[in-house]
Amino acid sequence: MEFSPVKDTLRIALVGDYNPEIVAHQAIPLAIDDAAAVLELMADYDWLTTSDIGSAEDLVGYDAIWVVPGSPYQHTEGALIAIRYARENSIPFLGTCGGFQHAILEYARNVVGWRDAAHAETDTSGRMVIAPLACSLVEKNEAIELRANTLIAKAYGQKVISEGYHCNYGVSEEFAAELERGDLRVTGWDDAGEVRAIELVTHPFFVGTLFQHERGALTGKPVPLVQAMLRVARG
């Protein structure tokens, strides 16, 4: 068996429409720099505007892909192309907030076969896999219970965590039931049992969270999932 060499420099694609006023966008570079320092490697990142992604070719050469908060995106298809490329090519993937929502949307359309899968923030027809939350999570903190022996649970090293949100949309009840049948598994829930994190079990690292764990970097906290993603990307 051949093993890939361990990389000491990583290239990360940050897919989303950069806005310096978005708190998560302020936090993401800090989270990456901190994780890279802990792992003693170099991590270079490029912000890729969704409207600049027209095909999978635009993602070739990246060691990890992070679809970041800030939806609705300028070009939904650009975000979906990036997610599909990461999923089909075993590229370490992280999706937070809007990235989580669009990872669900991509999976529904291209794996489950719901070609009319839709996002209630931007679509007016189709089967809504992303729907309005019963209660807004804009600038809210919440406890999340993690499924044991998953990537996210191993990264955090604990069963229950508390993280911050900035969103009004989550997984619809109809599609949450569908997730029990496939390889994209629910790995985190709130106290009411609502979906807050997912993982693709057939992939080396494909994790999405509705919460914005990257925000911890703004107060000097380590960001476990970013460290975990870079560790896998390093090889």
Image: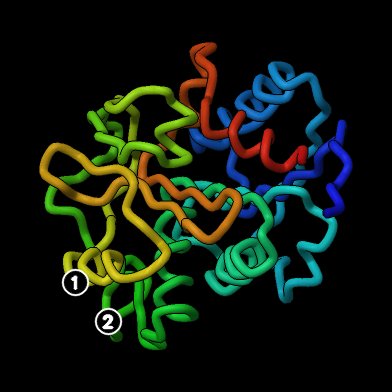
Three-letter amino acid code of the residue under disc 2? Arg
Disc marking residue 127: 2
- Percent of width and height locating residue 48: 71, 55
Secondary element type, mark 1: helix
Relative to 117, 208 lies left or right: right
Relative to 25, 137 lies left or right: left
Q: Quadrant of the N terminus?
A: bottom right
Q: Nearer the viewer, residue 52 or 176?
A: 176
Secondary element type, mark 2: strand
- Percent of width and height locating residue 188: 30, 43
> In the picture, residue 180 is in which quadrant?
bottom left
Q: Residue furthest top?
A: 220
Q: Residue at x 43, y 26 (%)?
A: 156
First in sequence: mark 2 vs mark 1: 2
Question: Which residue position holds label 1?
Answer: 174
Q: Nearer the viewer, residue 7 or 94?
A: 7
Q: Residue at x 40, y 45 (%)?
A: 209
Relative to 96, is 40 above or below?
above
Coloring applied to the structure: rainbow
Relative to 93, is 182 above or below?
below
- Percent of width and height locating residue 203: 57, 57
Q: Quadrant of the C terminus?
A: top right
Q: Residues within 10 Å of mark 2 (few under 14, many from 20)?
A: some
